[in-house]
Image (cartoon, helix red, strand yellow):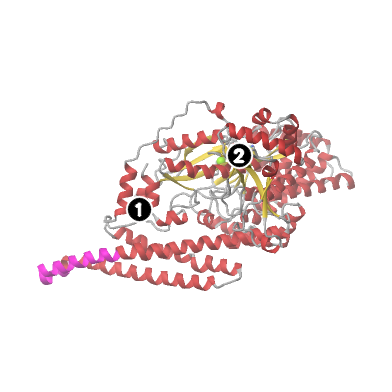
């Protein structure tokens, strides 16, 4: 009998939900472990406080002397909350977060010690980070990198440690993390959007990008998860026959949350509150044991930090509930995968959401300007946007059930499609007063009413407008949102800059009125962005054909998708907008390709190991039982055994065929790996892993999954899908 599997199943069945006692209201504890403005007011001098607030609002530098005051205040606050250590918390390109804890403690001679935390330690640190991926940057330029405080994201306490959000850069200034380019992209979109806002409102001084992510995940009993080597090592199941019941009944979606999962969520949300993560929504997702957590949206940089922090604490809190969180985009074949919808919008310091239709025709023209420019940006850079969400794990999800395809398209809903159609017929050149009035009253003026129409019917478009925001749905559940957010904000910034130039030109050279010029430019944008608009749902062959005709990219694999990052136009785009220079772009490309190869390599080894060490030996054992049975029948019944053992003998043969196929396929896969491991060209290596190694996974899986349904359940060593998915 397969002891580990049955032990795991037994342990999981007997589990009770943890009792989570929370006696305070959320509003009372919200942000109490965050060094936010309220805490700063209490612990900082006026000069120090103003200096931080100014740095947050205007990006000004903090003076060294003032930094000493800030660090002292921050330390006092942290110690009052029980913290003993501090760390520079940053997001290296591995996808995880990194931290190295130092104690506040310092000796001062004569056997005495004090708690110390100076401005130096707050502002800058030099982690021994030689093992973080850097795509060659630090080898070529400087041996070391340093972390520097990002005051726009507040410090917080987790466990006993004061965590200071930082950027991670090389000594020559190249970004080695996710945050640095994001901050630069947010700056770029701020500048570009403010310039465009001036057409409508001279008071606009700052535009911030907002992000509301929706984190999907699976919760699997930790003992069950630990019984599967593939889950342990790759975060997904590489084998497993689909269960008799899957998600066909749709009985999980928005259903009652199982008691153990609910206890976990309550615990998790409690920690979110302490850390100032505004968790708002929780519900079951479509697949069994799949859930979602969504916060109230925030300024994009903060939202990114909160999501990475959340992913980290999700795992930590899961431990005491005996759960393993599967963040992978496709943990189970044939079952819905997990995404992380990125809801995105732009808003001004005057409190206007630029992607929300307003009350007057003028504010609606502003809305249309930002709405159409976003569509145009996606149209121009669709391939880059696809690259923004490329990863080995997301490849499994894109194009599968209930997931967006690898083709980027924009969904805007029926009503706004109509509005664009009408705007397309606007006269070229100056508009007559009648036309303008008519437009303002009957087209632009009517938008607030039409928008009430629910635009969220389409769940699988890769980029959808949902009333007052765009929702980038192709983002994978394991992704660091900084990457897609950097790219999205960069392309929108670029588009808004181009728009401003074109409108100004019409005003200056053609002597047009501002409104006329805007209408004229928007009309042309609508005409040239049509290819990206698609109202259909998810993946279909027909859409694939149609998209090809329209000239849209359809890069199904990560190595294919990433190539555009090295295009001259891409390098120029990032460089011109000050988001990333060529060296930084190249480094990231290399890291992402490397990461892809490593993932496929690990999966391939896991596939080979499980097939050879678990599946084949089990098949042989079962076959021996059958052989024994046949021999016995022959001994008792003589020649009649041929009739009596017909089924058994057929099974014996079939098992042999599967074993043979598995062995030769695993050998072939290992040989392919050997070939590409020698390859020094990273693109050729990634292509090899993608097109020669990875396709064998499915072939090997086919035979292993067949054996799973043939072999005595008692012998099967791998915890089955039904046990993983339906244990609550
Ligand atoms: P769903 O997409 O599941 O129907 P919602 O659309 O209500 O749910 O919200 C999903 C996420 O979008 C939430 O995180 C929410 O805070 C965020 N969101 C709502 N409005 C905006 C906005 N203007 N900009 C960015 N995110 C937003
Ligand atoms: Mg949504």
The answer to which image quadrant residue 294 occupies is: top right
Mark 1 Cα shell of 10 Å, populated few (<14), some (14-19), many (≥20): many
| Residue extent of the magenta highlight | 619-642
Residue 293, percent across and down? 52, 39
| Residue 623 among those drawn in magenta | yes
Residue at 42% across, 57% down: 230
Residue 579, percent across and down? 72, 52
Judging depth in this view, the residue of 312 and 685 nearest the camera is: 312
At mark 1, the secondary structure is: loop
Q: Is residue 294 visible?
A: yes
Image position of 110 (left or right of 728): right
The residue under label 1 is: 719
Ligand 1: give its quadrant.
Answer: top right
Q: Main secondary structure of the magenta part?
A: helix
Residue at 55% across, 56% down: 542
Callout in the foreground (2, 1):
2
């Amino acid at each position: 009998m397969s002891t580990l599997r049955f032990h795991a199943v037994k342990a999981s069945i007997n589990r009770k939900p943890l009792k989570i006692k929370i006696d305070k209201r959320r509003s009372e504890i919200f942000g109490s472990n965050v060094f936010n403005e309220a805490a700063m007011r209490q612990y900082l001098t006026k000069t120090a406080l103003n200096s931080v607030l100014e740095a947050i609002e205007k990006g000004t530098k903090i003076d060294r002397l003032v930094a000493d005051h800030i660090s002292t205040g921050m330390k006092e606050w942290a110690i009052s909350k029980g913290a003993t250590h501090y760390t520079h918390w940053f997001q290296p390109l591995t996808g995880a977060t990194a931290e190295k804890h130092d104690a506040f403690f310092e000796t001062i001679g004569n056997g005495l010690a004090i708690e110390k935390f100076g401005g130096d330690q707050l502002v800058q640190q030099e982690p021994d980070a030689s093992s973080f991926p850097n795509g060659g940057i630090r080898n070529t330029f400087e041996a070391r990198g340093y972390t520097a405080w990002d005051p726009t994201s507040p410090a917080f306490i987790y466990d006993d440690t004061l965590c200071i959000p930082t950027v991670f850069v090389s000594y020559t200034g190249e970004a080695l993390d996710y945050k640095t380019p994001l901050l630069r992209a947010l700056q770029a979109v701020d500048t570009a959007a403010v310039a465009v806002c001036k057409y409508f409102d001279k008071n606009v001084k700052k535009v911030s990008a907002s992000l509301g992510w929706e984190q999907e995940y699976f919760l699997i009993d930790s003992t069950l998860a630990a019984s599967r080597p593939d889950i342990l090592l790759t975060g997904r199941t590489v084998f497993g026959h689909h269960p008799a019941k899957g998600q066909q009944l749709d009985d999980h979606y928005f259903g009652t949350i199982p008691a153990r999962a609910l206890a976990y969520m309550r615990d998790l949300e409690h920690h979110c509150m302490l850390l100032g993560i505004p968790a708002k929504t929780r519900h079951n997702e479509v697949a069994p044991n799949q859930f979602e957590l969504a916060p109230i949206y925030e300024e994009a940089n903060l939202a990114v930090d909160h999501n990475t922090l959340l992913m980290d604490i999700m795992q930590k809190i899961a431990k005491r509930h005996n759960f393993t969180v599967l963040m992978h985009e496709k943990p189970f074949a044939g079952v819905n995968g997990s995404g992380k919808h990125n809801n995105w919008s732009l808003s001004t310091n005057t409190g206007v959401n630029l992607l929300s239709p307003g009350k007057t025709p003028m504010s609606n023209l502003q809305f249309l300007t930002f709405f159409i420019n976003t569509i145009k940006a996606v149209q121009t850079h669709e391939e880059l946007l696809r690259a923004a969400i490329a990863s080995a794990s997301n490849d499994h999800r894109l194009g599968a059930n209930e997931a967006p395809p690898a083709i980027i398209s924009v969904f805007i809903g029926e009503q706004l499609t109509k509005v664009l159609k009408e705007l397309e017929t606007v006269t070229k050149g100056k508009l007559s007063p009648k036309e303008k009035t008519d437009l303002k009253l009957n087209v632009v003026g009517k938008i607030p009413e039409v928008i009430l129409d629910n635009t969220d019917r389409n769940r699988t478009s890769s980029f959808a407008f949902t009333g007052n925001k765009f929702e980038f749905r192709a983002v994978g559940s394991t992704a660091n949102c900084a990457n897609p957010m950097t790219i999205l904000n960069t392309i929108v910034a670029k588009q808004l800059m181009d728009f401003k130039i074109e409108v100004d030109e019409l005003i200056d050279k053609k002597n047009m009125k501002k409104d006329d010029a805007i209408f004229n430019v928007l009309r042309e944008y609508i005409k040239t962005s049509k290819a990206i608009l698609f109202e259909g749902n998810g993946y279909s062959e027909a859409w694939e054909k149609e998209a090809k005709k329209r000239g849209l990219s359809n890069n199904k694999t990560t190595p294919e998708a990433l190539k555009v990052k090295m295009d001259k136009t891409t390098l120029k785009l990032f460089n011109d907008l000050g988001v990333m220079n060529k060296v930084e772009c190249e480094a990231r490309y290399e890291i992402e390709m490397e990461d892809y190869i490593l993932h496929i390599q690990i999966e391939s080894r896991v596939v080979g190991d499980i097939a050879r060490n678990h599946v084949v030996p089990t098949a042989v054992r079962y076959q021996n039982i059958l052989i024994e049975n046949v021999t016995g029948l022959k001994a008792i019944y003589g020649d009649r055994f041929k009739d009596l053992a017909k089924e058994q003998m057929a099974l014996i043969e079939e098992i042999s065929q599967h074993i043979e196929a598995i062995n030769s396929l695993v050998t072939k896969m290992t040989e392919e790996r050997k070939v590409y491991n020698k390859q020094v060209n990273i693109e050729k290596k990634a292509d090899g892993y993608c097109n020669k190694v990875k396709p064998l996974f499915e072939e090997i899986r086919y035979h292993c999954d067949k054996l799973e349904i043939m072999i005595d359940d008692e012998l099967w060593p791998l915890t089955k899908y039904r046990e993983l998915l339906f244990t609550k």
